[in-house]
Image (cartoon, coloured by chain):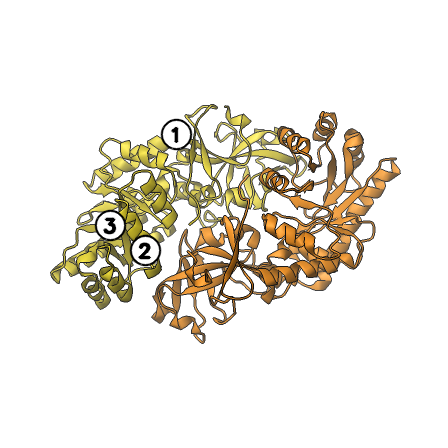
Chain colours: A yellow, B orange
Amino acid sequence: MKIVDLPTPCLVLDRRILQRNLDMMARAVARHGVALRPHMKTAKSIDVARLAAAVSGSGMVGITVSTLAEAEYFVAHGATDILYAVGITPQKLGDIAKLKAAGAEIIVVTDDPDVASVIAGHSAKLRALIEIDSGEGRGGVSFDDPVLIEIGERLGGSLAGVMTHAGHSYAGRTASQMREIAEVERGCVVRAAERLRSEGMVVPIVSMGSSPTAMHAVSLSGVTEVRAGVYMLGDLFQAGIGTHRLDDVACTVLASVIGRRQAEKRVLIDAGGLALSKDRSTQDGPKDYGFGLMLDVAGKRSYGDSIVRRAYQEHGVVECDPASAAMNLVIGDKVRVAPNHVCMTAAAHDRYYVVDGGDEVVATWTRVNGW
Amino acid sequence: MKIVDLPTPCLVLDRRILQRNLDMMARAVARHGVALRPHMKTAKSIDVARLAAAVSGSGMVGITVSTLAEAEYFVAHGATDILYAVGITPQKLGDIAKLKAAGAEIIVVTDDPDVASVIAGHSAKLRALIEIDSGEGRGGVSFDDPVLIEIGERLGGSLAGVMTHAGHSYAGRTASQMREIAEVERGCVVRAAERLRSEGMVVPIVSMGSSPTAMHAVSLSGVTEVRAGVYMLGDLFQAGIGTHRLDDVACTVLASVIGRRQAEKRVLIDAGGLALSKDRSTQDGPKDYGFGLMLDVAGKRSYGDSIVRRAYQEHGVVECDPASAAMNLVIGDKVRVAPNHVCMTAAAHDRYYVVDGGDEVVATWTRVNGW
């Protein structure tokens, strides 16, 4: 099947770009001699996870997930070492124990003393990382907060290590800022590990990472594992902050032109807020891409700055670059849209149509969405 | 099963409120003596469509859908009269013809002369409405544009009528503004029908509607059908523009507390940008609800103005009303979140857990997502 024969809207994944991105991150992490535990919350696909694991010298020790549905899916497809990197609740431990009984290790995360006691007291001998706040102000405790030691003591034999996520790196704009944030991220999580060790605790895992800090870190001394996920598929936001180049966006939304208004230099496409997501993360970046950048059906930037400026449920309004071939599009023509934030965009779609740089669909890979 | 035993995040649908909303719209439309063709793009559920059809005196003649997947799903569940209200492409007509062969009438929509010719020339004797722009500036032609007549002539025997959608009613803020927009919407679509009729064409369907204009219209003279959808489930945005009251939001997201920072008056919940959507449509309204308003597990407004201010992929950061019981929430506690824009929020979920005002889950209804 050819791309032009696909139903729209749908996701197109260029495997050649994906492979390049996987290789790039494997090299970036390998230079520090630490392990990679890629976050599958973006790709949500066993086929992508297998490609990541096959990268020579990737140092991949397992995967990271963001939902129980992902954990169950990857265990069903053979994964045995999974970090579930969203703060756990006592009610979810039963499902974690079931996955452990099926032969998989699911490491959970907490920043709460009471939950730590529940984890330690669970009959399934669960393991947990303590979440450290390295400046994002979302979850986690500060490395110098006395509660860190209390949580470690309460976890007892369930303590597997510490983790942090410098999500505020997304506010960084230059490579120099990314290096600084990565160093703060590293400093916080390593000092947390050292404090626990100074109290006699064993801290095997010291985990950090987002795609930008993993790419830009100068030192990962003291860190044992890096998590990153969005780098695999890439998006306009990550290109804007320098995690990868604009041509490294591997995942795009194929759409059909469903309306045109030449006088107003606009086309209407059948990819709207559901197919693209309502994410506006490029809004405050170096370039505001609205709800996405329109590419030609081959994924090339033939339409200049033709940007999806309005997104209704199933309609996207593209303001066309008047100097480009976008002005010649007619109803039924296929285009592709590079997403602002691919984690959000891809989640609306149940599969990837895979290409190898050309116009032939060479595979269909399913995704695990929902919870 | 009780609500508190549900996995989170998930959708909870209160059938008592849903029924109230269905009754309310049926009455609003019935006072004009026109037919209701509810838009199923919001609920995407045959169970909800059946409840709508069961309302006494609803005047429901069929349904409206926004995707081929919806059309196929509703036909598979017995629907026979469907308006597919997104501009059609020639490539999609094959699927429409298949549904027609299965016994269903799928009326398509176009605003393009060339597509009109393709529709008219199709062997399946398809029927189409011409889309009229009543001020939204998305799709459609102006009622006084000469191309209207050309499209009608090209459609020939396939011409089934005209339709418009005053989506710009969402920018209205008062009942008086809604009445004005509804009257403009009515005027444009009725005049389009009259122009076609004056050229000797038969125009049986004159369709308009959004939830706010359907609720507020003073006259629907000349209109034959009204489309509206979001009123069924309700959301914070529609409450803000007066389509319904805040207590008429039937569909909420059940979430678990996964973190708490009492000093910062914040809790973290396991409903983030995916479970709530990144929609920010209340941003410019009378009250900015961030990414949603946190309710208690029973769906009551016990937490005052506790609002989801930040939404990461799987984390929602709630700024708690310090005067409320939200400050006492602990990890694992369940809460509900009223959504900004329920069409976007519900689309991330594959089912509704249905309650009848109480804490017992009385049914599970599936949704048809994707394309």
Residue B365 vs B327, above or below: the answer is above
Q: Chain of mark 3?
A: A
Is the Cβ of the residue at disc 3 closer than 8 Å to that at disc 2?
Answer: no
Q: Work out whether residue A89 or residue A184 is closer to the camera in this orientation and state it.
A: A89
Q: Chain of mark 1?
A: A
Judge the density around disc 3: few (<14), some (14-19), many (≥20) Cα neighbours within 10 Å.
many
Question: Is residue A67 visible in the rendered structure shown here?
Answer: no
Q: In this rendering, which labeled residue sits more in front, label 2 or label 1? A: 2
Q: Chain of mark 2?
A: A
Considering the numbered disc 3 on the image, is that residue within a helix, a strand or a loop? strand
Label at residue A258: none
Residue identifier under label 1: A15
Q: In this rendering, which labeled residue sits more in front, label 3 or label 2? A: 2
Q: Work out whether residue A254 or residue A185 is closer to the camera in this orientation and state it.
A: A254
The amino acid type found where label 2 is placed reads: Gly
Q: Position of residue B365 (x, y in %)?
A: 54, 51
Q: Work out whether residue A257 or residue A154 is closer to the camera in this orientation and state it.
A: A154
Question: Is residue A53 visible in the rendered structure shown here?
Answer: yes
Judge the density around disc 2: few (<14), some (14-19), many (≥20) Cα neighbours within 10 Å.
few
Tell me how far mark 2 sits from mark 1, CA to CA: 37 Å
Residue identifier under label 2: A94
The amino acid type found where label 3 is placed reads: Ser
Q: How many marks?
A: 3
Q: Position of residue B242 (x, y in %)?
A: 65, 63
Residue identifier under label 3: A207
Q: Quadrant of residue A78?
A: top left
Same chain, marks 3 and 2? yes
